Amino acid sequence: MIEVRQLSKRFGTVQAVDGVSFQVGEGEIVALLGPNGAGKTTTLRCLYALARPDAGEARIDGISVQDDPRRALARIGVLPDAKGLYNRLSAWENIAYYGHLHGLPEAQIRQRIQRLAEELGMEDFLHRRCEGFSLGQRMKVAIARALIHQPRHLLLDEPTSGLDVGSVRGLRQLLLDLRARGHSILFSSHVMQEVERLCDRVVMIGRGRIVADGTRDEICHQAGTDDLEEAFVQLTGAET
């Protein structure tokens, strides 16, 4: 389970996150939605220990990310907003490097990379250097890197960005398969169609605070509309 409890984070005079609380249960896909600057990326960074909250805490399977980051982070796969790869390494080498960091044996790394390459459609560029890759190719490598150690939980920041239709379909099916196996998945996105097709619940954040948390229908009912995009605009103040 992924848990966020009264999380707060300030940068100078800006209160980026203000008392945010929510959770993602096992076998659940939850979208974290918010306009730019709403606090969603800061929340995700606190979850994977890149930022330390001023108050509150994040927990992975009951393990505090702030107090015991190594144990907590071993249970999650992360696709951050910065999809940086080592350009002089091939896609295979980038993914394998993360497998070694997680202590996986070589044979297991080879087996898992081959399976991920098939699932994500990476065979054509798996052994090419990442320098010169398209955004979609880089995204696939970053996703595979996040999944190499078969984490119980996933934190994905806009995972479909730059992917073509076929790749989006493949990623969608992969996430649904992971959910069926009991994984917890939290991802941010601006693509309402993907949110509606994938997610069990939606958490909306605006100006650093949670403004809605529920199923698509519950959130639309709260906003008095049948359209999730319109509910998003109304509840988060995205156009103000």
Image (cartoon, rainbow, N blue to C red):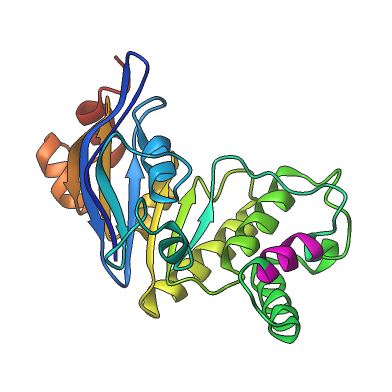
Q: Residue furthest bottom?
A: 107
Q: Is residue 235 above or below residue 215?
A: above
**SS assignment for the magenta stretch, majority:** helix
116 left or right of 17 in image: right
Q: Residue at x 61, y 54 (%)?
A: 165
164 left or right of 59 in image: right
Q: Nearer the viewer, residue 28 or 226?
A: 28
**x then y, percent, for residue 153:** 41, 66
Q: Residue at x 21, y 27 (%)?
A: 234
| Residue 94 lies within the magenta run | yes
Q: Residue at x 50, y 69 (%)?
A: 173
Q: Which residues are magenta?
A: 93-100
The N terminus lies in quadrant: bottom left
Q: Residue at x 38, y 78 (%)?
A: 180
**x then y, percent, for residue 109:** 71, 78
Q: Is residue 215 above or below residue 60?
A: above
**x then y, percent, for residue 160:** 55, 49
